Image: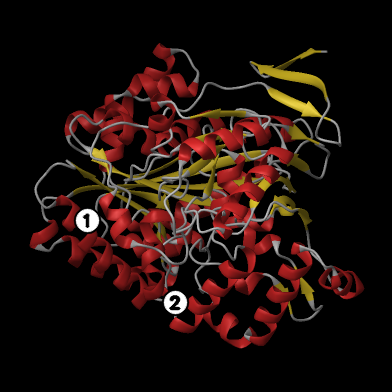
Amino acid sequence: MNQPNYKDILEDLQKAVVGDISTTEEDREKLARDTSLFYVKPEIIVYPRNRDDVSRLLAYASEARKYNVDISVTFRSAGTCMTGGSLTNSIVVDTTKYLTRISEVTDFSATAEPGALYRDFEKKTLLHGWIMPSYPASRDIAGIGGIVSNNSGGEKTLTYGKTEKYVRSLDVVFANGEREWLRPFEGEELEKKMQEETESGRIHREMYALVTENYDLIMKSKPSVSKNSSGYYLWNIFNKETGGLDLTKIVVGSQGTLAAVVSATFSGVIPKTHSRMIVMFIPSTERLGEIILRILKHKPESVESYDDHTFKIAIKFFKDIAIKMGGNMFTLGLQFLPEFWMVLTGGVPKIILMAEFTGDSEDDVNQQVKVAYEDMKSFNMPIKYTSTAWGSKKYWTFRRESFNLLRSRLSGMRTAPTIDDIVVHPQDLPLFLPKLDVIFAKDAYKGLVYTVAGHMGDANFHIIPLVNIHAEGIVDTLHNLMEEVFTLVFEFKGSMSGEHNDGLLRSSYLPKMFSPEMITLFEKTKNIFDPLHVLNPGKKVFADKDFAWKHIDMEEKHVVIKPEPKVVYVDKTHDVVFQEIKIQDGREEKSA
């Protein structure tokens, strides 16, 4: 490929794109990071004003690659990806400036552009009595684009599943600039779609052939754990009973490598009206697997956790937690007295396990909690249950804010997301966890400080090493740790990513998780959707491990999430703004 002349490319794009374009050092530096280990500085930043801008940009890049010009296009929303999924040294598209609209909100569905934040989306859907339950722990700062591209999950995934379950349709732009409304097709409608002499018709034809000709291999290769964000989800797109094909199921979770999502339409669930929580203070991980299996028998809506390191940091920076909870500082201080006492007396548990029970009546929830509480007391550990939703809130705030606190408050140390998203089968935990402890007990890792949080009900562990990135040999240590932990996870038929996806971090490990035959099918999938590799190359397939590890971020800087924007409602054409709605203290203020 020929090296691009970005000065000429900039001039061309300024003529083609209505939105803004930047090449300033400040802007490029800002978008060189996400929440991962990596630092990759883009050459050009495009802020598309509308879908047509996205189409023109991709058509231009596609044409350039036909002439062997080595440019590519990577899309980005809020920048909370933990794998470097939205980092590029070419053209990055920042959707958070203009593509932030939330529209067509009804009692059953809502549509959002990729730059919209989940927190704003949920405010709108709650006005209609529902939520999209696959939000991540970073719900207050996560963008819709990243939630779709990573197939995010979170605290409610144990009961309700991941994002893939709630995407009804996608408005996408293919790599050549052609737009399409992706949705499920079957029967005559699918036949008609596959006969089209369009890019969409070609992609549907070739993907249909790929999945039907390799159906047995694909289904055999599907990860059997409850959640997975690694690879391309070929096992999700073809319904053998109906003969239907749904390409939304493979664009979701593809990290922008197959098509650019310019809006997504979601369904959701009606949240339960009552909730209570059992909190277990577990002194060691020795019986953790047994404890998790026992609590799961009582069918809680979620089972979450965080560890002693996170707990101590949260108490140390209590003011941050109090601000997040939004209450009176003195009253909150009284609420946290038991936690302060734990720290002062050295009685901090190794793991704090939270099991939340929900229902449509207070009596229903209280009965669930009572039965589970009596059963869990047999483990002879400190255990309590909350009597109000407010009593649960402090534990949820600890859990949801744990990663942000670690990233922003550790002096001389930084988070190193590497083995941050492993998943095994819950029934394997009694065997898996001791073997994981053996790895961490090795001399090579004895000095390594790490935190453990995650979705214990799914056996999805967020293990985050805390390191001095300048320490001698630390990069090799992290690399070796990934190799050993992933090997163990694969021995238990698990996944290296339940939610956070592959990106720069894990894409090169996919051949260890999937067979050579499946890797070939993944590569064919990329080539069908994006034959010129315009979209976010080097992620998912054709990964370059050396490139990734040469781009470790050696500075202790963090992504700054922008202040909360207004939510903009638009009509069905997505072009005419007719009302702005700003939420303040739970009240709506409307302006024409």
- Choose between 268 and 179: the one closer to the eye: 179
Left/right placement of residue 126 relative to residue 47 reads right
Question: Reading the chain from its start, which is encountered first: label 1 or label 2?
Answer: 1
How far apart, in angstroms, are the residues tagged by discs 1 and 2? Answer: 22 Å
Looking at numbered disc 2 in the image, what kind of residue is underneath it? Phe
Q: Locate residue 314, reporting x and y percent.
A: 32, 30
Q: Is residue 126 visible?
A: yes
Question: Residue at point 65% right, 32% down?
Answer: 15
- The numbered mark at residue 78 is none
> In terms of image quadrants, where is residue 506?
bottom left
Q: Which mark is residue 514?
A: 2
Picture coordinates of residue 438, whole percent (x, y): 18, 67
Q: Is residue 156 above or below residue 573?
A: below
> What mark, if any, has residue 478 been given in the picture?
1
Q: Secondary structure at mark 2?
A: loop
Q: Amino acid at mark 1?
A: Leu
Task: Say which of 565 and 31 sits in front.
Answer: 31
Do we see residue 233 in this rendering? no
State how many labels appear: 2
Above or below 8: residue 512: below
Q: Residue furthest right?
A: 188
